[in-house]
Image: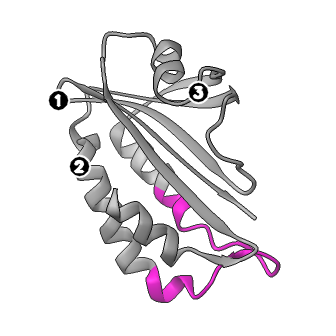
Amino acid sequence: MEEFKRIEYLLYGNNYEVWFNLYGPADPGAGLIDTLKMLVSKDSEISGVVPSTPKEAMSEIMNMVLYKGDTGSGPLELESKKIEISELMSRVFSSIGIEDAEMVVEFGFKNGHPAYPVFWDFAYDIHSKGQRWIFVGSSSD
């Protein structure tokens, strides 16, 4: 998604960068592990599967995306970019229909994570309007 490229650019910082990817749409009837092995990594193993709600998921994702960092690492000039980042994330949420999702599940990768998370990461299985999306994001140094 073009929005991801812009958000990643806006959040680039001192010993800090972010990464996002959206996998799908996928078959909502398939199991989560089978879906991850097909779309993300054949080595995918999961842990910490927790039911969520659209509102909780969007709030948790935004809290991570707007992570301020610390003196040694973090996005540069985050305050001046928050409005644009929030608008871009709103477009992402709308495009996958998370606001109206029938099911949202948070999970972690035990193996097969597609990035190298350091400061934060998230992974959600989102079922909306007959489609399934796997939304993954992380930050690293």
- Asked if residue 48 is positioned above or below residue 8 in the image, the reply reads above
Could you say where residue 102 lies in the image, as x and y percent from the top left?
A: 26, 26
Residue pointed to by mark 3: 41
> Per the image, is 73 magenta?
yes
Could you say where residue 134 lies in the image, as x and y percent from the top left?
A: 42, 34
Give the secondary structure at mark 2: helix
Left or right of 53? Residue 37 is right
Give the secondary structure at mark 1: loop
Mark 2 crowd level (few <14, some 14–19, many ≥20, 10 Å Cα): few
Give the secondary structure at mark 3: loop
Q: Earlier in the sequence, mark 2 or mark 3?
A: 3
Residues at discs 2 and 1 in contact (Cβ within 8 Å):
no
Q: Which mark is residue 95?
A: 2
Name the colouring of the figure: one colour
Q: Which mark is residue 64?
A: none
Residue at (43, 66) in percent of width and height: 5
Residue pointed to by mark 1: 129
Q: Earlier in the sequence, mark 1 or mark 3?
A: 3
In depth, the one of 68 and 28 nearer the eye is: 28
Residue type of the residue flagged with mark 1: Lys
Residues at discs 2 and 3 in contact (Cβ within 8 Å):
no
Q: Earlier in the sequence, mark 2 or mark 1?
A: 2
The CA span between labels 2 and 3 is 24 Å
In depth, the one of 51 and 24 nearer the eye is: 24
The CA span between labels 2 and 1 is 11 Å
Residue at (53, 38) in percent of width and height: 123
Residue type of the residue flagged with mark 2: Ser
Kindly indicate the quadrant of the structure image that contains residue 56: top left
Residue type of the residue flagged with mark 3: Ser
- Asked if residue 23 is positioned above or below residue 29 in the image, the reply reads below
Q: Which residues are magenta?
A: 62-81
Residue at (57, 22) in percent of width and height: 49
